[in-house]
Amino acid sequence: MGQDRGLPVLLVDLDTVAPHERVDAFQHALDQSVPNDVVHEDPAAGIRARLEGWRIGALDLVDARGTGFQVRRTEKHLRRLRERPIVSVTLQTRGTGRVELAGRQQLLGPDDISVLHEVSARTYGWSGTGSSQALMIDAGRLGLPVETVVEASFRLRASPLYDLTLGHLRDLWRDPARLEAGAGAPALGDATTELVRALLVSAMYDTGEPVVGAALDDTLTTRVLAYLRRHLTEPDLTPERIAVAHCISRRQLYTVLGRAGISLEQWLITERLEVARTMLASSAHQDRTIAAVAARCGFTSASHFSRRFQAAYGLTPREWRRHAARATSLQGS
């Protein structure tokens, strides 16, 4: 979205726009991402809106707040959208959101997740002052048919993954700037996409049917990996904690990961080393000691970190930092 990683991109702030130009400015801002017809609740009383965006890996995030409005997606918009279809996943953070899709209506409160496939006709908005937080996923990366996404969107709370997904989305929005700038942003974006996919797949089935057990088994690895990536740098990320978080035994945790060809300890070390490697090469962290970088990446022992780093990359952390600094200096000369 922007060139300055970690900083929000201001898409529009109508407080900086002349009142008579605000309708057109808001329409233009929305059209940059997904086209809509916009109807404002009370334009005569004044329109206010502020849209900010971030990018975490392949995900676009947009925080929207302002006065009441409704966006309407009709068939005339869909031709453009089919060129790059997206799926939006939205939290209503203030006010009551309203969605009309496939002849059905939904009201959205603070504990609701709204999932919309943007190549389906629909309306969305709120009355009075409201706000929402939406992430946009490339529909091709999600890999689900339009019909599946639309039908599952009405059954999300039937999924046992609902609370997990809601918590994950709230975590993303606590500090999107920090997550955007972090070395793990691409992996976090991928994990979020997989978690949303798992939510939609599991929501397609009624709880208690045999197929649900199979669906949960298929998505458990995805859920565990999403959890690991969210808490990757926390030193107390133990097998016991991971198992409890997913209501399974430690033995089952190892079995599930083993079937996917994953060794938990080695996976954690490899991912943490890659985060540390990126930090050591970044000028933003040049004032951190090697021990501080190790601790920041979840290693409780600096000496253990150094041994594993050298074994993985053939250089000590200090040697790698010097090498990266020289390479950066040569590029800048």
Image: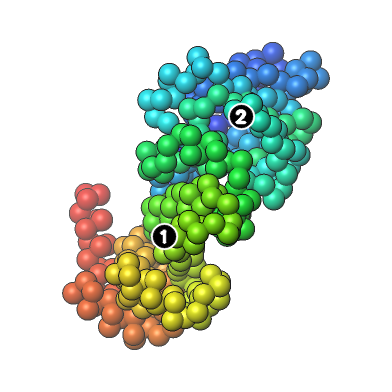
The residue where tag 2 is placed is: 101
Q: Nearer the viewer, residue 103 or 41?
A: 103
In this rendering, the count of numbered labels is 2
- Residue drawn 47% across the image and 81% down it: 250
Q: Position of residue 212 (x, y in %)?
A: 51, 57
Earlier residue among tags 1 and 2: 2
* Relative height, residue 164 to residue 93 (above, below): below
- Dot 2 surroundings within 10 Å: few (below 14), some, or many (20 or more)? some
Can residue 15 be seen in this snapshot?
no
Q: Position of residue 302 (x, y in %)?
A: 38, 83
Q: Amino acid at mark 1?
A: Asp
Of all residues, the one furthest to the right in this rendering is 45
Name the kind of residue labelled 2 in the image: Leu
Taking 281 as reference, is 270 above or below it? below
Residue at the front extreme? 210
| Residue 233 place in picture, x, y as percent | 46, 70
User: Looking at the image, which is closer to me, 38 or 240?
Assistant: 240
Q: Which mark is residue 193?
A: none
Under circle 2, the secondary element is strand
Q: Which quarter of the picture shows residue 4?
A: top left
In the displayed structure, would residue 102 be above or below residue 213?
Answer: above
**Looking at the image, is 25 positioned above or below residue 246?**
above
Residue linked to disc 1 = 218
Viewport quadrant of the N terminus: top left
Mark 1 element type: helix
In-front residue for pair 105/91:
105
